[in-house]
Image (cartoon, rainbow, N blue to C red):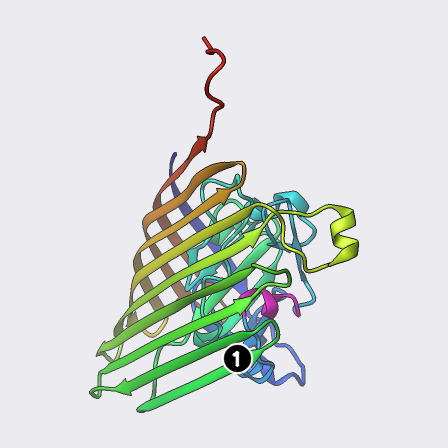
Amino acid sequence: MINKFAIFSLCATSAIALNAADTKLDTTVITATGFESPLKDETRNVSIITADEIQGRGYASVQEILEKVPSVTFVNPGFGDTVDLRGQGSKANTSVKVLINGIGLNMLDTAHAVVPINMINVDDIERIEVIPGGGSVLYGGGTAGGVINIITKQKPEDFFANISAKFGSYSHRSTNLALGVKATDDLYLKFNAKAFSENGYRYNERNRGYYTSGSAIYQITDTQNITLNTNYYSSKIDTTSSITKDELNNNRKAAGSDKTFQKDRQLDISLDYSIKPVDELEIRIMPYYQKIKMTPDIFSSYVTYGLFEDEKKGVKTKGRYDYGSGEFVAGYEYEKNDGARSSIMDMNMPTGGGALS
């Protein structure tokens, strides 16, 4: 399955002064235009969840974070929870675009109906920006419900080293290591790694794995910089099948007779180049690569080996011109998206007594 598309976008916005006491108005926003701009100058309804909020409330996953945002809900079409904005329902996975540092997480093959938002380390998130409503001008189709952009931490101002551990319900355990350094006056480096393990509500349910991420920011000149971002995720998930009503009444945590072992992998790489040839003009160019692989294996009276795979290669270009009372934004994006799905079933056939033809 292959999908190629190109997006050309134009938008003009007018600067509007907003009077509000919310301290978040000084926060910068990227998702609305693709460039950093103060939230107080943004005319659209944007919700921002900062790193301080994430750490202060001890969230363990991106889903836990988004569940607390008023405009966000989750729906389960049958293959797991997927994020929803503005009541998209069963179409949420194709109507809400989820981004990590501007790169889409939505997979081309939507049969499993899930956007893999939990393949991101919550301890490495700088902020999450949520914009309900269409965003097709900047981000193409699949944005009728809105856009969610997850932005990871990047530029350390000074050396830091931090190691932390979390413990929670369902035997949740995680250890996070974060390192950052201003290597030279022009070069900033950051690395993050996290290992985790947790049980599910029912017996024989477990999820364990690890995240790693790194970034390098080089300030070429006062008006040029380039940023390399990498993120990798790997996990193993054990689940069981549904149980009968009588089994449920007897023990709500009872495991089903069938077992599923799933391995998930995700790799993101992007290179973001920014230049301001004059004070009024900013240009950004970002080539990127992403690969997501999910392999569920189901063991019951028969054995099924499954595969969902998604690969993206593309480049985004955007320009912003500030003409004083407002700004003009233009952009072009090209993406090649390959998807693959397969299933192999092993079944024991009865022997003896006859033959099938």
Residue at (39, 68) in percent of width and height: 211
From where the camera sits, is residue 31 visible?
no
- As rendered, which of 86 and 243 lies closer to the eye? 243
Q: In this view, does 146 lie above or below 301?
A: below
Q: Is residue 342 above or below residue 29?
A: above
Q: How many marks overall?
A: 1
Q: Main secondary structure of the magenta part?
A: helix
Provide residue 204's location: percent of width, then percent of height: 56, 59
- As rendered, which of 28 and 312 lies closer to the eye? 312
The residue that label 1 is drawn on is 27
Residue at (41, 42) in percent of width and height: 307
Q: Quadrant of the C terminus?
A: top left
Left of 289 or right of it: where is 38? right
Residue 221 occupies quadrant? bottom left
Residue at (61, 85) in percent of width and height: 23
Which element carries disc 1, helix, strand or loop?
A: loop
Provide residue 85's location: percent of width, then percent of height: 64, 55
Q: In this view, does 185 lie above or below 16?
A: below
Provide residue 14's location: percent of width, then percent of height: 55, 65
As for residue 44 lying within the magenta part, the answer is no
Q: How crowded is mark 1: few (under 14 residues within 10 Å), some or many (20 or more)?
A: few
